[in-house]
Each structure stands twice: as structure tokens, then as C-alpha cells.
Image (cartoon, rainbow, N blue to C red):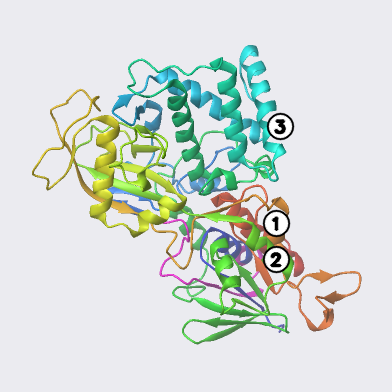
Amino acid sequence: MAKKARIVIIGAGMAGLTAANKLYTSSNNMFELSVVEGGSRIGGRINTSEFSSEKIEMGATWIHGIGGSPVYRIAKETGSLVSDEPWECMDSTIDKAKTFAEGGFEIEPSIVESISGLFNALMELAQGKEISQSDADLARLADIYETATRVCSNGSSSSVGSFLKSGFDAYWDSISNGGDDGVKGYGKWSRKSLEEAIFTMFSNTQRTYTSADDLSTLDFTAESEYQMFPGEEITIAKGYLSVIHHLASVLPQGVIQLNRKVTKIEWQSNEVKLHFSDGSVVFADHVIVTVSLGVLKAGIESDGELFSPPLPDFKSDAIKRLGYGVVNKLFVEMSQRKFPSLQLVFDREDSEFRFVKIPWWMRRTATLTPIHSNSKVLLSWFAGKEALELEKLTDEEIIDGVMTTISCLTGKEVEKDTAKTSRPLTNGSLNDDDDEVMKITKVLKSKWGSDPLFRGSYSYVAVGSSGDDLDAMAEPLPKINKKVGQVNGHDQAKVHELQVMFAGEATHRTHYSTTHGAYYSGLREANRLLKHYKCNF
């Protein structure tokens, strides 16, 4: 009887479990398969949890478009889209948001909608989409887009951030006629400073979509390669982990091994040798590496290199060039359920009118919203430096920062649940019941940046990298020169093909940063092996 090919998948997240599921169900038991996971749970950057008796997602949250999404298909087929219990973002509370500017000024929806329309149109243009506007609006946007693109392309490297800034500047030049009057009812805010601050608020939301600390590091050209599914974006009623558990459910007991952290991958001999943190060693014919781009970055830069021999330049250079950022979620439990959805508009850092009491790590947070319309749990998203700072703060420091921010922007009194004294009000209010003092009872935050198994949240195409780098990430090793029959200078007969393979969201050219991108990448590598062994699938 022929010896079974030994396949080890590193990582039990979406990519790893998709690959394992496909290999197990399509190979007629011809592989010796194992999934080794460094942590104590499966799911990777998917982690459904509970806070204040509510189901929440600490990591991946959304199905990004239901039209064609494999994640949506699995969730629907397994009945995971319905639940008797409420769940995070089950309804769109942000549509009914109140927008407050620093100083206690509630901004008229018409002002916010105007800038929202401008920002969304610019992002759609950057993404290569056709936008639906009236003829007059289209003509104006065409001029703005042309100006922004020209200014953006004049620099040494074009970024989404520079394009957006140029777009706003072009918009302002088209309406201002050289003047900048104040806005009646908004204190010392000028029209330009207010509209620019609203525009920045939408930019900060975009940062959480991409994980980039600053949109000026996000490559402009690559933005139009990114693909999205049509249809609405939804969350999963029974939790994102329900999809993970479905993928894992077909695997026999013992295939998934938890708390098995790989410390070194020796390749380019007759077999791959995996070293583990407990000192044990496993040999394999094929290894599918599904760890995050953050772990790969650390793995090639550390003294104890993860790969031996080191990865070839084409692979390590792609790992270095691509961007990988941190996005964290903050959940805040309030004493009551009447808290509205808030959009937060902050003054510039260099403004003499800004409230110095607001901590810097709150100043690029765009929203603070109930997780559903009848919840007393609020959610806020953090990206970049602020997300990393959030991980270091104590619950007490976070509660103080959120209270101060809410008070300075809305004029509404907020206390800790143990507070004895009231805070002074500015002006404005959150709801009709001005006499009721809202209290923050507890908070919960994610910590993706400091977790050594992830070192961040998801990838983006940074300025200086391109979609080609994402393709390079997906390239298996050793890289075979078919014409001369050599593998990186070695005789092909002595080095097996497909020794080290790569999957994960950072290996998909058009769906990076998403769970469905991770799913597709796992399927891709499983199919690569099935084809190699001439399995029918």
C-alpha cells in the first residue's frame, strides 16, 4: 500500500480550516492530514464572544456583500443567519446617527450628508466604480476627480490619502470663491474647518476598513483592483464562529491540534521539518502556512528566522512591502438603553479651539453606536496607533477617556457607575431626557496588535507595493524553473514540489483583508494539492 502524503496546515483560522475541509472531503482518505494551531481555540481572527449578555464579535464582523460570498452561502445553509437572541449589528443604527462637533454642537444632517456624498463618491472613483449622480453633480465631480488625480499623480507615489485630500481641496476651491465664513450656530467653527473635520471623520472610518494607520500609506492604484460582492453587508446571527465550526465539523477527532506553536520550518530537502515550541518535531511532505502577514513579517525579521533556509527574495520582499495594520473594537456598557448612535467630529490637532481634555487616542474615532437598536452596549472602532494604545490602557483610563469625549462633544453628562459628583455640561443634548445622567458600567476591548499569534488585524496594499506582491505571497515553494528542471539552483529530482504553500487573506489579490479572501485562498491551496495528486474534485 502506497504511503500517504503527509500534509500539515499551520493555523486553524478560516484559510486553514477551509483547506483542511476541502482536502479531507475530496481526497478519498489519501492524505495524512493535520492542522496545528498555536492558540487554545480555533477561528484565528474570527472570535465570537459575549459581553453584557450580548453576542459580540471580537474580530471579523461582517459578511461584505451577500451576492456571491461563500461565507454567506455557508451561513445561510447552516441556519446561522437567524437567531431568537439579538446580535451585534443586527440592524443599522448608524443610519439614525446624530453627528456632534467638538464643543457640543449637533450638526445639521444636510451638512453631514453633503460631505458624506463627496467622500463616498471620491472613494467609489478611487475604486474604479461608476457613480450614480445627477448630471450637474457628475460634471462637478468629474472636475474634482480630474484635479485630484492630477495632483495625486504629480507626487513620487500616489496614495488614497493624497487623492482624498486633493479631492476635498478641489471641492472647496469650487465652492468657496476664496472666502471662508463662519457657520451660524456652530461657535468658532468656520465652514471649511467644519466640513474638513466631517470629511476627516469619514476618512477615519475608512482607516478601520483598511487597517492602515494613515490613508497616505494606502496605494491608490491598487485600490481599483480590490473587489467587493454586490448586495447588503450583514452580520451573522449565530456568530461568525458558526461558519468556522461548520468547516471543522467534518474533520475526524485529532486532526486539529491546539496549543501547537510552530517555531521553525525547515524546507528544501526531501521533506519539511516542523519544530514546535514544546521541543517536538514533525515531518511533512507539504505544509500550508496560513499565519497572518504580521507573523510572517516578524518571522523573517527576527534573529530566530521562522524559515530555514530563509525565504527567497521574491517572497520576503513581498512580505516586507505589503501593509499590515491593527484594528481593535471597544465595547462600552451603559447604564441604560437610550443612548443614540453618535458620529464624532473633532477639531484639528493644531487648532487652538480643540478640547485638550479629550485624549489623543479618541480623536480619530469616528463613531460610538449601540450594537443594535435596543442594546445598552456601545461599539467604537480604532485603527493604527490609537488601536495599539487602546490595548495598553486600563479599563479605568478607557472609561475616563470615553466619558470626557462624549461630554466635550455632546454636552451630555456622563459618569462612571460609581461617580459621586456631576460633570459640568457644555451645550447640546443627546436625547430629550436632559435630567438623566448616563453611566458607563464596564468596557471590553480586543487586542489583536499585541497577540503574538496575529500581531495585527489584516493586510492592505501599501504605497510601494502592488497586487503583484499579493500574487507573490500565494506562490508555493520551492519555486520551480520548469525549463531547466531546477529549483533555486537545486536538482529538481532531489527537492519535492509544493513543500511550503501559503494561504490567508494576505495571499489573495482581489479579496485581501476579508474572511472570504481567506476562504478562497484555503480552497486554492487545497485544490493545488488535489490537482498535484490527480484527485477528482
Q: Where is residue 92 shown, x and y percent of the image? A: 40, 32
Tell me if residue 270 can be seen.
Answer: yes
Gap between marks 3 and 2 measured at Cα: 33 Å
What residue would you read off at disc 2? 315
Q: Earlier in the sequence, mark 2 or mark 1?
A: 2
Tell me if residue 534 can be seen.
Answer: no
Q: Is mark 1 on a helix, strand or loop?
A: helix
What residue would you read off at disc 3? 150
The C terminus, quarter of image: bottom right
Residue 387 or residue 438, whichever sits in front: 387
Instruction: Specify the quadrant of the image occupied by residue 165.
Output: top right
Q: Where is residue 281 shown, x and y percent of the image? A: 55, 86
The amino acid type, in three-letter code, at marker 2 is Lys
Judged left or right of residue 216, residue 436 is left
| Position of 187 relative to 213 (above/below) | above
The amino acid type, in three-letter code, at marker 1 is Asp
Q: Residue at x 42, y 26 (%)?
A: 194
What residue would you read off at disc 1? 469
Instruction: Specify the quadrant of the image occupied by residue 160.
Output: top right
Please tell me whether the stretch drawn in magenta is mainly helix, strand or loop. Answer: loop
Q: Earlier in the sequence, mark 1 or mark 3?
A: 3
Q: Residue at x 55, y 49 (%)?
A: 514
* Magenta region, residue range: 24-48
